[in-house]
Image (spheres, helix red, strand yellow):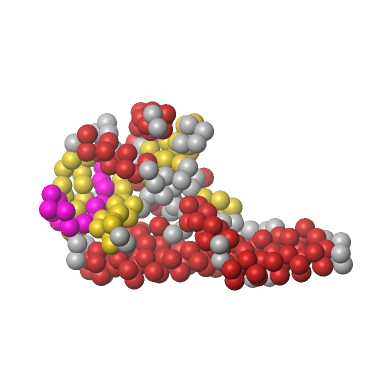
């Protein structure tokens, strides 16, 4: 089955903020970050170009042989307004207008629904959906009939599989819209705190599931997103924090990273070898 290319489910421009500083500025050398596979507990150096993605992950099948990349284009449109905001924050300018906050919230919500974890969740939901099960049974019956009439059953199998994938992608986009509608009004009135790590040796991790939503009884109380190893965006109404910059020490950073590790699907992205080894120790202690 042809695909439109390698699709990131965590944007490359976002991951570039977590590059190892020792890999920067070298001639004829591609900068890298450290990738920890929490399942195999292996560590690798990789370019952001080659991680947090999969070939054809967002392909929608326009015809039997030609994927059209519809949803990759959609996510690119959402990333577009978020890119200058990320760069603005990385430059130390943390004052965001309401329009910038809305654009960034849209990026956060869709990021929460675009990775491997949501694809897995959608698969489970669809498997429990009576309508979907009925359609899948019909597809299976149709496939069996067509197999007996064609010399190319693998093409038909690929087509049926792509239809099912398309349904899951559409559900993911719907989830993203629902997330945004649900949290936009609440979070715009919350405090936007940028936690600043005061340690050069210790920083915030990120992962294949970088956004954290926390709440009780379906009531959203907090949103977390690492911006860089030095900065974590925290949106909540906790009296401990105020709008703007809030310096935190090594103990706080490690605590935030442990919370992040609980939502990782498979891969953690670190800015140093030492930090990736810390992640391995945390995985081994579970």
- Residue at 37% x, 31% y is 282
Q: Position of residue 157 (x, y in %)?
A: 73, 60
Closer to us: 89 or 233: 233
**From what the image shows, is residue 202 above or below residue 226?**
above
Q: Position of residue 107 (x, y in %)?
A: 37, 62
Closer to us: 270 or 40: 40
Locate residue 255 relative to residue 244 in the image: left or right. right
Residue 69 makes an appearance in the image: no
- Residue at 52% x, 45% y is 50
- Residue at 76% x, 61% y is 155
Quadrant into which the N terminus falls: bottom right
Question: Does the stretch in magenta take in 237?
Answer: yes
Quadrant into which the C terminus falls: top left
Q: Quadrant of residue 82?
A: bottom left
Locate residue 2 relative to residue 221 in the image: left or right. right
Locate residue 267 relative to residue 95 in the image: left or right. right
- Residue at 47% x, 42% y is 266
| Residue range corresponding to the magenta coloring | 230-243
């Amino acid at each position: 089955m042809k695909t439109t290319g390698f699709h990131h489910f965590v944007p490359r421009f976002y991951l570039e903020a977590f590059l190892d500083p020792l890999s920067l500025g070298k001639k004829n050398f591609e900068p890298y970050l450290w990738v920890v596979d929490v399942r195999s507990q292996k560590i690798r150096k990789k370019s952001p170009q080659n991680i947090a993605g999969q070939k054809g992950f967002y392909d929608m099948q326009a015809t039997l042989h030609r994927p059209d990349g519809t949803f990759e284009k959609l996510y690119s449109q959402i990333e577009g307004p978020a890119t200058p905001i990320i760069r603005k924050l990385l430059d130390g300018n943390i004052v965001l207008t309401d329009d910038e906050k809305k654009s960034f919230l849209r990026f956060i919500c869709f990021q929460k629904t675009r990775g491997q974890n949501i694809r897995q969740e959608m698969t489970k939901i669809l498997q429990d959906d009576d309508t979907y099960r009925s359609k899948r049974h019909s597809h299976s019956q149709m496939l069996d009939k067509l197999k007996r009439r064609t010399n190319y059953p693998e093409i038909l199998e690929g087509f049926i599989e792509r239809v099912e994938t398309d349904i899951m992608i559409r559900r993911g986009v719907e989830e993203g819209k629902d997330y945004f509608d649900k949290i936009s009004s609440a979070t715009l009135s919350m405090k936007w705190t940028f936690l600043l790590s005061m340690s050069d040796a210790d920083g915030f991790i990120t992962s294949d599931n970088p956004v954290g939503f926390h709440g009780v009884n379906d009531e959203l109380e907090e949103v977390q997103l690492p911006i860089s190893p030095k900065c974590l965006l925290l949106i909540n109404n906790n009296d401990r924090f105020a709008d703007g910059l809030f310096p935190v020490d090594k103990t706080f950073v490690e605590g935030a990273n442990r919370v992040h590790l609980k939502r990782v699907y498979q891969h953690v992205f670190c800015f140093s070898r030492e930090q990736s080894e810390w992640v391995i120790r945390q995985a081994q202690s579970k």
